Image (tube, rainbow, N blue to C red):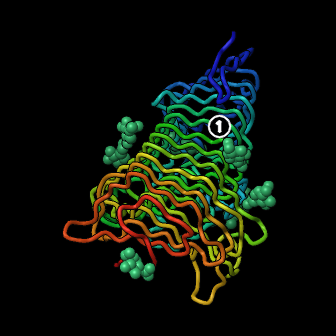
Amino acid sequence: MLLKAYIASGLVAVAAAKVCSVKPLGAGKDDTDRVLAAIDACGTNGFTSFAPGTFNITRKMTWTLNNAIVDLRGTLSFLPDVTYWLNASNTYRVVDIQSQASWFVVTGKNFVIDAHGTGGIDGNGQTWWDYFATRTRLDGDGRPIAFTLFEAQDAIVRNFKIFAQPFWCNTAAKSARVVYDGMTCNATNTNPTYAGQNIVPNTDGINTYRSDRITMLNWDITCGDDCLAIKGNSTNIIAKGITCRGGNGIAIGSLGQYVGQPDIVENVTMQNLRMLRLPTQVQPNMKNGVYLKTWTGSVTGTPPTGGGGGGGRVHNLVARNVSLDRVDFPVHLYQTNSGHSADAPSQLAFSDLRFEDWTGSVTTSNKLVDIECSPAVPCPGVRFDNFAVPPPSGQAPRFICVNVVDEVGLPAPCNATGLP
Ligand SMILES: *[C@@H]1O[C@H](CO)[C@@H](O)[C@H](O)[C@H]1NC(C)=O
Ligand SMILES: *[C@@H]1O[C@H](CO)[C@@H](O)[C@H](O)[C@H]1NC(C)=O
Ligand SMILES: *[C@@H]1O[C@H](CO)[C@@H](O)[C@H](O)[C@H]1NC(C)=O
Ligand SMILES: *[C@@H]1O[C@H](CO)[C@@H](O)[C@H](O)[C@H]1NC(C)=O
Ligand SMILES: *[C@@H]1O[C@H](CO)[C@@H](O)[C@H](O)[C@H]1NC(C)=O
Ligand SMILES: *[C@@H]1O[C@H](CO)[C@@H](O)[C@H](O)[C@H]1NC(C)=O
Ligand SMILES: *[C@@H]1O[C@H](CO)[C@@H](O)[C@H](O)[C@H]1NC(C)=O
């Protein structure tokens, strides 16, 4: 049997010598052994098919896929047992940034996971959000990432649905040449006790880290945090056709959290982006369009919760064709994340940032652009083209540029106060 699949670089043939098919066992049963056995048998040079239905996954799971295709028509439902998963020995810690936990890791080379718009992951997040509604949440506290690609190369993830991620929805770490085409993440609180509150923080659509050539096409993300978060050493990133429903918007960062480990973000192309505000009772936040953030130049505490002092650069980013539905702040750049007034300025340098073809609406602030670069490394090459987001009615727009070497293209001057 010969199966063909489109990998980032072209058509790749996967010689599927082995075929495995798995059906869910049914309510009350544990599917983890059978799922892992199928991947063990057919995850190398093979084809694995998971039938529609719900697979009950009760422990951490790694899929190693080499020259493989997985048809995932069913849903991997992760046991809603918060205290079990919070025990560090029950998750992986392969995502170095902020020591985040993973319950499901996919690794390997030359593979396709096609979920056909029906399959994917159920994170059973409501249990988690309720649990943490009255507890402190910290980075690295063990809340698991729903779907982790780690050391994955030449891979396609297609038409994949993730429902109720407890924490980050996706992470691509130490990976290269991955195309995600069709991804849904939906962290929506349905407990009336918390209506109108954001009890789904940290449910980011994806964090990319130490990865090259990650392409995200046709994403639909409902969350209470960053829709996309492009973190340190993400290079040659493409995001196209991204709908963000609620949350903080699209983030570059945070960067510069780890002193001595420079973060390099270069060549980021994002286009056809939509930011949509949800009804307040469902999700109160729709904060930014695109925002960029670094820690300060001082080290305060240690990661995952503290840090700062890391250098590096963000170079060559474009955000094109962006439509905003009642966001608070369309464009924001700041280098004072978790900072204090006496901190040293960040050494992480931004250059060549372009914002083209922006439309839509804001909520109540007239601060349409607020780019506050570090005095240590002022930003050259900030370009706007057809930035047509109007201020709230009856107000003049404010465009703020601090330590920006040269800005062109805004319809009014951009300077330190934004006020004439
Ligand atoms: C999942 O499997 C466990 C046994 O490990 C079982 O107790 C539980 O009821 C199952 N859950 C579902 C939804 O079937
Ligand atoms: C954490 O899980 C390990 C392995 O299952 C177990 O040995 C240990 O007792 C657990 N720790 C706690 C605090 O429950
Ligand atoms: C997300 O889930 C909520 C709750 O189940 C649902 O009401 C909403 O329609 C879903 N959003 C999308 C975009 O499917
Ligand atoms: C990023 O890449 C540079 C150059 O390869 C390396 O020096 C740096 O440590 C990396 N940083 C991180 C956060 O991995
Ligand atoms: C960014 O793109 C340029 C032009 O294609 C390329 O020369 C450069 O190597 C890329 N940077 C990285 C870090 O890959
Ligand atoms: C701009 O993005 C929207 C989706 O938000 C898309 O429908 C439209 O075709 C895009 N326009 C262009 C010129 O690509
Ligand atoms: C900001 O721009 C306005 C209009 O050009 C100008 O009057 C004002 O002096 C500028 N303020 C600063 C602090 O540069």
Quarter of the image with the N terminus is: top right
Residue at the top extreme, as displayed: 1
Q: Is residue 51 above or below residue 255?
A: above
Point out residue 66 in the picture as x, y percentages from the top left corner.
75, 29
Name the element at disc 1.
Answer: strand
Determine the residue positioned at 74% across, 64% down. Answer: 262
The image shows residue 10, relative to residue 244, as above or below, that is above
| x and y percentages locating residue 316 in the rendered image | 61, 53
Q: Which of 32 and 117 lies nearest the eye of the viewer?
A: 117
Q: Inspect the image, locate mark 1, and give the three-letter code of the amino acid beneath it.
A: Val
Residue that protrudes farthest toward the bottom in the picture: 342
Measured from the top left, where is residue 204 in percent x and y?
51, 55
Q: Is residue 65 above or below residue 304?
A: above
Give coordinates of residue 53: x percent, y percent. Answer: 48, 30
> Which residue occupies the foreground of this view, 28 or 89?
89
Residue labelled 1 has its Cβ within 8 Å of some atom of ligand 5: no
In the picture of the structure, the residue carrying the numbered disc 1 is 178
Q: Is residue 307 left or right of residue 134?
A: right
* 368 displayed left or right of 85: left
**Is residue 337 in sight in this rendering?**
yes
Q: Quadrant of the C terminus?
A: bottom left
On screen, residue 153 versus residue 418, left or right, reads: right
**Residue at (71, 18) in percent of width and height:** 14
**Residue nearest the viewer, comparing 264 with 176:** 264
Q: Where is residue 236, by image quadrant? A: top right
The 10 Å Cα crowd at callout 1, few under 14, some 14 to 19, many 20 or more, is: many
Q: Is residue 105 visible?
A: no
